[in-house]
Image (cartoon, grey):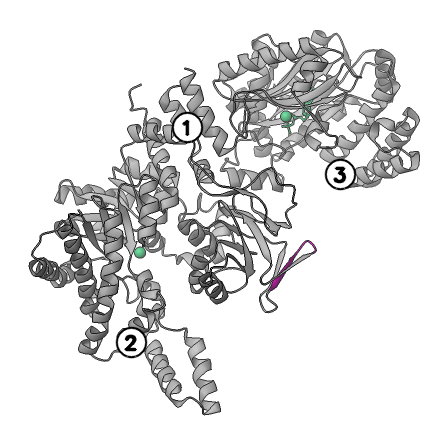
Amino acid sequence: MVMTATKTKWVYLFREGSGDQKDLLGGKGAGVAEMTRAGMPVPPGFTITTEACRQYYADGRKFPQGLWEQAQEALKDVEKATGKGFGDANNPLLVSVRSGAKFSMPGMMDTVLNLGLNPETLGGLERLTGDERFALDAYRRFVQMFGKIVKGIEGDIFEEALRGAKKLAGAKTDPELTPADLRQIVEVFQAIYRDHTGEAFPTDPMAQLRAAIEAVFSSWNTDRAIAYRRAERIADDLGTGVNVQTMVFGNMGEGSGTGVAFTRNPITGANELYGDYLVNAQGEDVVAGIRDTEPIASLKKRLPAVYKEFEQYARKLESHYKDVQDLEFTIERGKLYMLQTRNAKRSGEAAVKVAVAMHKEGLITREQAVARVEPRQLEQLLHPRVDPNVKEKPIGKGVPASPGAATGQAVFDADTAEEWGKLGRAVILVRVETNPADVHGMIAAKGILTSTGGTASHAALVARGMGRPCIVGANQIDVDLRAREFSSNGTTIKQGDEITVDGTTGNVFSGKVTTIEPKPSAEFNTLLSWADKIRRLEVWANGDYPRDAEKARANGAQGIGLCRTEHMFMEEERLPIVQAMILAETTEEREKHLAKLLPLQRSDFNGILKAMKGLPVVIRLIDPPLHEFLPNREELVRETTELRITKKKAKRLAEAEKLLARVEQLSEANPMLGLRGVRLSILYPEITRMQVRAIIEAACDLKKKGIDARPEIMIPLVGHINELRSVKAELEPVAKQVQKEKGVQVHYKFGTMIEVPRAALTAGEIAKDAEFFSFGTNDLTQTTFGYSRDDAEGKFIGRYLEQKILPRNPFETIDSGGVARLMGIAVKEGRAARPGLEVGICGEHGGDPESIKICHDLGLDYVSCSPYRVPVARLAAAQAVVAEGSTSR
Ligand code: ADP
Ligand code: MG
Ligand code: MG
């Protein structure tokens, strides 16, 4: 152990590294190494490895043994390469100390520029450049950055002081400040530093360097860096590299400048050099947005030779990396320096366009093109979006939970949303949070905004399932449900006021802002057609209405994996019948009400089966506990009490009392584990008999019209084979009877959901009676973990994720250790008992790319997801194949 500790190579000169060492050197370090290797003009420097950063944390925030010595050694090499000396008053070497992890985390970690300045080297810099003002400006920036980044002094304090000094000097912009002003500002900044740290600003360049390296290590674990990693699913244990690099100066007059450029347009994907240039400025000015930049094309006019050289490097780097590069460069007195190259972050639109174009240009294979696009990015392309060029400023921001933009009048309760929606008004439902009682309002709303909750909250899930734009956790928004208004950053929005929510960015706007309609591009269709050729999994969609089925088909779905029938019970004109049916005291009476529901259900099924003609439609028989169809208990208690006191409306009182008695009778301690699913069919077989009749009648009617309807009847929540047998014995005769009555035979199946562990574990038995399986992974996750989802997500999953007790929210991505294992058993034993058994998944996981990979690996036949996510799933299913490396080129 001691051996390795002393021998570990913690430091690599740029010329020693290479582009494929992102793990060790970080993305930035690997990039500069690769450019150095390719002979491009990169200011000399060295990289401290990510391994050193990991060791630093492992050792309790101490430099690993040998690191500092190796860094000093490398610095000597840099001095030799540049002919300058670190701390040399006559010819000072200044460096930048830059963070850089394996995956780029833009703006998350910090960089210190101009390090090595002190009163002596400042003099040297003045003499060498003959520019006192420049040198003082560099010093000013250094003190500020060092104070802020290394010592954690709030940046605003320096900015405030700078503003004050400018005002005093009568200067509007930084360049108007004289050397004398700057000298003064440096002194003020150093005084701020002393006040906050209790020590003098360090003059020893070595001490500065050591502190800056340590600060970069520390910046790996700032709150914002941790939050970013969580959002981007980057592991917390990678660590960052530290790049120490010779400074070059873009702020040495008109022949100098700095810029960032993309080898292709990262917003549209167009094949053009795209970026910003700032004349006479240092790199951080471009990013900070302090001064208005010029488009990169202006460099072509100002310094044509430099532009040409840069263009050439850009092209070379792109074809080397075979991907769009994000480049940083600086021009010091007419000489170009390359400071960074990395794979560019891009919009969904650009991602698709670039992937397809690069294949057509022969840079990458189809498989690579398909693997290149982040599946979630496709979703962004399918929803209307706020035009990225709008001038309006958002009034608030939350967590983007379901993409797309919507404009409408703010409403604060679900009933109003529904009422106004029926009048044809566009509404946005604004709540603190939502729960199942709000669903009718969510359906009626064009968009949803909540002030609490995360991406896994009820609002987020439901909105995504419905394809409604949604923002959650907008905590600057103060919702007053009683007053029916919210205020956000000084703006008050009352009920009826128009707002726009952009669920792609999380921005909330007052009023209407311009949106753009998505129109899948030719490239989008091309990419998906490639994905379709590659993938093995079929992609089906969940949908309850014909309109869902149409959307699903348009997006390429190959079946309906889950059609829930209970939504059909909730609709306004039906609910009273459903309630009467539940209140019925005898089976006969219940059947009377069910007879009224039959034609309604039949027409529902007719619509969806027709829309999906030729393709399978899995229809799930009634699943939720019956009390969900009855009014809320508290409300009934209130109503009956009121009516008793006022002694008016005796008839209504009697009704309400009856309802209340039934609600109380039906109430359960644990409805999720109570009388629902197949258990309902066993206690009230007449309900599901009616449903099966409606399904088969609809299918027969269609068949007679020459339409190929393919219903698959799914029995939920089976845990024991006898449950399935008992229900099938009730239902199968109904199906036969209907066909006899109608005089046609239709294609149908009886199958079951696998959503409790016992079903998975006894799948071999169950498959004898089930013609298909569909994993209900939401319930399967709940029952495998013993969590109730709402309680878990509301109370403890957040903490579990923070403390890494769970690696992932198992309700978002299938738990690979437990739930996936049960699924594996069910697939294997089910297919052993019934060869060719159709197996799919209809839980929300069916649209999650990582879960889709698990389903692919388990050998499922299809995944089923929200119609809007079908393209996402098609791509993810193809990527699962590419990841396997099993396709031919
Ligand atoms: P980020 O990852 O946030 O882009 P960087 O380490 O790239 O951080 O640095 C921030 C800014 O400082 C960039 O504009 C970069 O060009 C500039 N910069 C970094 N190192 C140097 C250097 N050696 N000489 C001149 N400018 C530099
Ligand atoms: Mg950078
Ligand atoms: Mg279920």
User: Label 2: few (<14), some or many (≥20) within 10 Å?
Assistant: some
Q: Label 2 vs label 1: CA separation?
A: 53 Å
Q: Is residue 392 above or below residue 41?
A: below
User: Label 3: few (<14), some or many (≥20) within 10 Å?
Assistant: few
Which circle's residue, 1 or 3, is located before the other in the chain? 3
Q: Is residue 499 left or right of residue 782?
A: right
Q: Position of residue 687 (x, y in %)?
A: 21, 67
Q: Secondary structure at mark 1?
A: helix
Which circle's residue, 2 or 1, is located before the other in the chain? 1
Q: Position of residue 91 (x, y in %)?
A: 81, 11
| Residue at 57%, 50% in the rendered image | 500
Can you tell which quarter of the image residue 695 is in?
A: bottom left
| Residue at 28%, 74% in the rendered image | 582
Which residue is outermost to the bottom?
A: 647
Q: Secondary structure at mark 2?
A: helix
| Residue at 49%, 63% in the rendered image | 420
The magenta segment is 485-490
Task: Give the residue type at disc 1.
Answer: Glu
Task: Give the residue type at disc 2.
Answer: Ala
Q: Position of residue 481 (x, y in %)?
A: 58, 66
Q: Nearer the viewer, mark 2 or mark 3?
A: 2
683, 657: nearer the viewer: 657
What residue is shown with label 3?
Answer: 155
Q: Which mark is residue 523?
A: 1
172, 191: nearer the viewer: 172
Which quarter is ligand 2 in? top right
Residue 5 appears in the rendering: no
Q: Position of residue 805 (x, y in %)?
A: 46, 47
Q: Label 1 vs label 3: CA separation?
A: 44 Å
What residue is shown with label 2?
Answer: 580
